[in-house]
Amino acid sequence: MIAKTLEKELNLEQWQVNKVIKLIDEGNTIPFIARYRKDVTGSLNDELLRKFDERLKYLRNLEDKKTKIIERIDNLEKLDDNLKNQILNAETLVELDDLYRPYKSKKRTRATIAKQKGLEPLASLILAQEVKEPVSKIAENYVTDEVKTPKEAIEGAQDIIAEIISDNSTFRKKIRQNTFYNGVIETKAKNKDESASGYEIYFNYSEKLSKIPPHRILAINRAENEGIIKVKVDI
């Protein structure tokens, strides 16, 4: 599977992929392979071999993570054929993390607190959009010593719904795509006196995420890490 992916992505012959994997697994470095194993690889250059090595590590990590995630979800007795196929067909670590997200152990969130207060059934009713009377009326049935008012019950149910949506891999993928194609990155100076920082261009800057070049992202990351600018993405 990994060999086929590398063959397709890098436009290589099957024998080349197999030979390079063997050389890497034997402990040979990329510069060594590029310089002294041209006869074995079909004269693949250093740049292509580095891409090969990076993708090989990524894909192996991806496959290893798939195995572990399937095992963990299966241990929770929540693995079905559909979910298993989705995991096996995931092409990126981000996609894999999205699929695993609903099954990860969570820290104490507003949603988990609301569930502990017994508001999950109310959240399910609201989410189903099939109520035949005002939600405020239904919420009266969930008023307890811990939930003082119908309004508080509804707010707790909303917290649960928000987490359900956030954990949905399909929604996350669409939100991520929408953010990339329509989002705008905005940067502001934290301190106007940082005039000698070399990052003045980013003191009041904005650009579409889909058009920003990699070198500019790196510069923004450095400026943010150094505490010179604040960064946000507006969708």
Image (cartoon, rainbow, N blue to C red):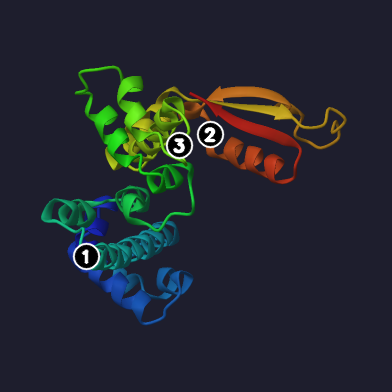
Few, some or many C-alpha atoms within 10 Å of disc 3 (few <14, some 14-19, many ≥20)? some
Going by the picture, which residue comes out furthest to the bottom? 26
- Asked if marks 2 and 1 touch (Cβ < 8 Å), the reply is no
Which disc, if any, is residue 213? Answer: 2
Query: Mark 1 highlights which residue?
Result: 74
Say which of 128 and 21 sits in front: 128
Residue visible at 31% across and 34% down in the picture: 123
Inspect this view and state whether residue 40 appears: no
Query: Mark 3 highlights which residue?
Result: 147
* x and y percentages locating residue 160 in the rendered image: 38, 38
Depicted 120 relative to depicted 207: above or below: below
Depicted 2 relative to depicted 177: above or below: below
Q: Earlier in the sequence, mark 2 or mark 1?
A: 1
Inspect this view and state whether residue 15 appears: yes
Q: Earlier in the sequence, mark 3 or mark 1?
A: 1
Look at discs 2 and 3 and give the one toward the viewer.
3
* x and y percentages locating residue 206 in the rendered image: 61, 22
Q: Earlier in the sequence, mark 2 or mark 3?
A: 3
Residue visible at 48% across and 23% down in the picture: 235
- The amino acid at mark 3 is Val
Few, some or many C-alpha atoms within 10 Å of disc 2 (few <14, some 14-19, many ≥20)? few
Say which of 31 and 72 sits in front: 72
Cα distance between the residues tagged 2 and 3: 50 Å
Cα distance between the residues tagged 3 and 1: 35 Å
Left-right relation of 206 to 34: right
Q: Of helix, strand and loop, which one carries label 3?
A: loop
Going by the picture, which residue comes out furthest to the left? 81
- The amino acid at mark 2 is Pro
Q: Of helix, strand and loop, which one carries label 2?
A: loop
